[in-house]
Image (cartoon, rainbow, N blue to C red):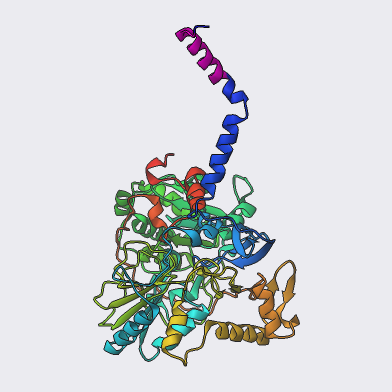
Amino acid sequence: MKLTRRDLLVWGAGAAAGLPFTPVPWKLLDDVSIWTQNWPWIPQPARGPVEVKQSFCTLCPQGCAMKVRMAGGWPVGVSGVNTNPLTRGALCPLGFGAHQLNWHPMRLRTVRHDGVASSWDASQTAFVKACNRGPVVIVDGHPGRAASSVFESFTEKRGACLVAEGPETGALVPYENWSDASARALGYDLENAQTIISFGAPMLDGWGVPGRFTRLWAERTNGVSDPQLRLIHIEDSCSRTAAKAWKWVSAKPGSEGALAAGLARVLIEECLVAARGPIPRTTLAQAADRTGRTIEEIRDLARTIVAKPPVLAIAKDNNPEVAALNGILGAIGARGGIVRRSKLSKACLSREGPISNPGAILIDSTVPWDFVPQTDAEIFRFTAWDGGSSRAGWLLPAPGFLEELTDVPTAATSVIESYAIAPQLAKPTHEVRSAAQFLASVDKNLPMPEQIIHRRCSNLRRSGRGSVHAQEITPVAKFESGQKLEEQLQAGAIWIGDPLRPGGWKCEVKEWPQTMATATSEGDWSASWSAPVLPPLATKLYRESKLREAPARRTV
C-alpha cells in the first residue's frame, strides 16, 4: 500500500484531534508538575499535626491579634481574632501574609559588614570598639516593650535612645511644645467622639490599629444619612476614606493648615465654641485662596463640624495648625478628644533629632527600613530582611515573624490601655539575635526581655487593675499569681486596663502656629510600607483586591 502525503496529513490531524481524549498528555502534565514541585530549592509545605495558636503581630507597633495555623511546628496561615476587643478580627494585608516573610528570598541569613559576609564575634568586637570611641545611640521603632527597657538600661550612662515614631504619633508632637507631656503619652478618645474631622488621615484605610476605627464607624453609621459618628474628611483626591466618609471636602494639596486656620477664625468670630484661643493670622480670604474653597464654604464647614460635639481633629502627620484647632474646639484633655493616657513626660528624640558625635548607632529591627541616620558613626542595623538600600556598615540577622518572645504594649495613640505577649512559635533556620540579646552579650548586667516580661505580669497581678480578655473576660484580681496571668497571656489573651478618665492635663496654645504647607507624597503608594519586603499574599491582597488605589487612579 502506497502512503501518500494526503494520508500523512489526515493521520496527523486525526491524532492531534484525538490526543486530548487519551490519558497520555494529562499523565505527562501531571509528571511535569510533580517534578517541578520537587526541585531542591523550592520550599516544601510542612507535614505534621495541624494546630491553631493565638498570638499577636509584631511587624508594627499596633500589635493586632491573630490566629496562626501551624503544621508540623511551622506557621502556614494567619487570620484575625474576632474576640479581641481592639482589633475585632481585622488584619492589614501585610499581617495576612506575614507567615510567608520568613522564607522571603531577601531574608538576611548571615552577618554582613560592608556587603561582605562576617561573623557575630566580629560584629561584637567592632561594637565594643565603637562604644569606646563615643556615646551610643539606640534607635527603637516600638517603644514600651521589654526590649525597650533593655535599650534604656544600656544607654543610661552610655548615650541616648532615639524613637522613630510613626505618622499617628507624629501628629501628636505639637502638643509637646504646649504642655509637659510627650507625644507617646497622648492618645485619641475615638470611642466618645461624635464628629471627627480628618485632615488627610486615612481613617478608613489602615490608620491606627486596623479594626478599631473601621469597626467603630460601621457600628455607629449603619448606612444612615445622619450617623451617630460623623467623619468629615479633607483631601484633594477621592481616596477610599473620602469616598466612605459622611462628608468629603476637597482642598488643594498642602493646604490643610490654612483650612484649619480658616475654620478656627470662623469658630472664634461667630462664637460657635466655648473654648477660646489665639486668633490665626490667616484671613478667610487667604484661607480660601490657599485651599481652593470659597469663604462661604469654609464658614458652612465650621458650622457643620460643631453641630454635633464632641469634635476631634486628626492630622495625617505633624501639623501644628490642626493641633491648635483642637484647642479652639475644646478637644484637648476632654472626653472624645486628645487625652493623656500615661504619666510619661520625658520626650524621646525624634528621627530628625540631633545626634552629636556618637561612637556607634544601633538600629533595632522594628525601625522602618527607610530610616537612615545622617552620621559618620559606625552603624549596626538589626534586620530580618535585607532592604538593599541601607547605609549601615553592619547588617545583623534578627528574628523573623514569630521567631522570638516579645511583649506588645499599648498601641500608639490608643487610649485603651492594653498588654499582650507574642510567644515564639517558629524556630529560626539560621543563627539570629535580637538587639537586646546582642547588648546582653556585651553587658552581662543587663536584664533579659523574658525577665522584664515576668516582672510586668507580676506587677499587673499585684495592681489588680483591668481584666484579661480571651474566650471569657476574667478580672485580674481572680488570678492566683503573676505566673498564671502570664500563662494566659502567652496563650493569646490580652490584658485591658480600666477605662481612662479624661482630664488632669494642662495644654495651652498661647500663639497660633505659623502657616506652613504640608509636603505632598508623590510616587507609588507602596512606598508607604515600612517593611523592606512584601510577601506575595500581601501584594495580591493590596493590589488586586483594590484595598487601596494608587493616587493616579483615584477619581470622584
Residue 18 locus on image (x, y percent): 59, 20
245 or 52, which lies in front? 52
Which is the main secondary structure of the residues drawn in magenta? helix
| Residue furthest to the front | 1
Magenta span has 14?
yes
Magenta span has 119?
no
Magenta stretch bounds: 3-17
Task: Name the residue at 58% across, 82% down.
Answer: 453
Residue 363 locus on image (x, y percent): 38, 74
- Tell me, yes or no, if residue 404 can be seen here: yes
206 or 443, which lies in front? 443
In this image, 418 relative to 257: left or right? right
On the image, which quarter does residue 194 sit in? bottom right
Residue 167 locus on image (x, y percent): 42, 64
Q: Quadrant of the C terminus?
A: top left
Image height of 193 relative to 187, above or below: above
- Tell me, yes or no, if residue 338 can be seen here: no
Task: Name the residue at 60% across, 86% down.
Answer: 455
State the count of labels.
0
536 or 407, which lies in front? 536
Image height of 255 relative to 494, above or below: above
Image height of 529 relative to 142, above or below: above
Residue 80 locus on image (x, y percent): 62, 58
179 or 116, which lies in front? 116
